[in-house]
Amino acid sequence: MDLNSIYTELIMEHNRSGHNKKPLLNPDITENGHNPSCGDDISLQLKLNGNIIKDASFTGTGCAISQASTSMMIDLIKGINIEEALNLVELFIGMIKKEINDENELEKLEDAMVLQNISNMPARVKCAVLSWHTLKEAINKIKMV
Ligand SMILES: [Zn+2]
């Protein structure tokens, strides 16, 4: 299997499973993200225990890339603290901007690492980074409280 089909397969799988796509009961934070250039709309919900992201999910509509990227991110952030989550956001955005290409570092992104190829498709970059920017906004709000 070449990299392109692994990439397509993972995006399809995250779209299909929808295991992270549901409203949370009593979320501590709800943050909305919108990408007008494609029409992607997501609502990210977090449940916190101190600084730990106890649970996370999303609802919304959008293209396959935006939905898969959100689901991949949620898999990563469940159970870690907000500082670690912010580091992953920076890593993901760094990867998309081609500023970070150290494979060992990028492996921390697990499934989301396959979105590296998106940097070659400028029109899709905003779809891929939407949820990560939304998470960053949400964490910044948590830190202000
Ligand atoms: Zn999109």
Image (cartoon, helix red, strand yellow):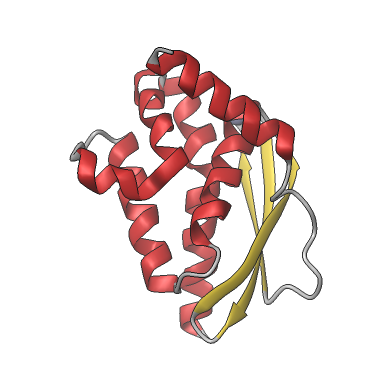
Q: Residue furthest front?
A: 1
Q: Nearer the viewer, residue 94 or 74?
A: 74
Q: Is residue 142 above or below residue 17?
A: below
Residue 12 at least partly seen? yes
Q: Which of the 4 image quadrants contains residue 16? A: top right
Q: Which of the 4 image quadrants contains residue 106? A: top left
Residue under the image location 39 percent in, 18 percent down:
3
Q: Quadrant of ligand 1?
A: top right
How many labels sit on residues?
0
Instruction: Provide residue 41's location: percent of width, then percent of height.
Output: 69, 42
Instruction: Provide residue 4's location: percent of width, then percent of height.
Output: 43, 15
Instruction: Provide residue 137's location: percent of width, then percent of height.
Output: 51, 62
In the drawing, does residue 110 fall left or right of residue 65? left
Residue 37 at least partly seen? no
Instruction: Provide residue 40's location: percent of width, then percent of height.
Output: 66, 35
Residue under the image location 73 percent in, 42 percent down:
18
**Quadrant into which the N terminus falls:** top left
In the drawing, does residue 106 fall left or right of residue 79? left
Q: Which of the 4 image quadrants contains residue 57? A: bottom right
Residue under the image location 68 percent in, 77 percent down:
28
In the drawing, does residue 10 fall left or right of residue 62? left
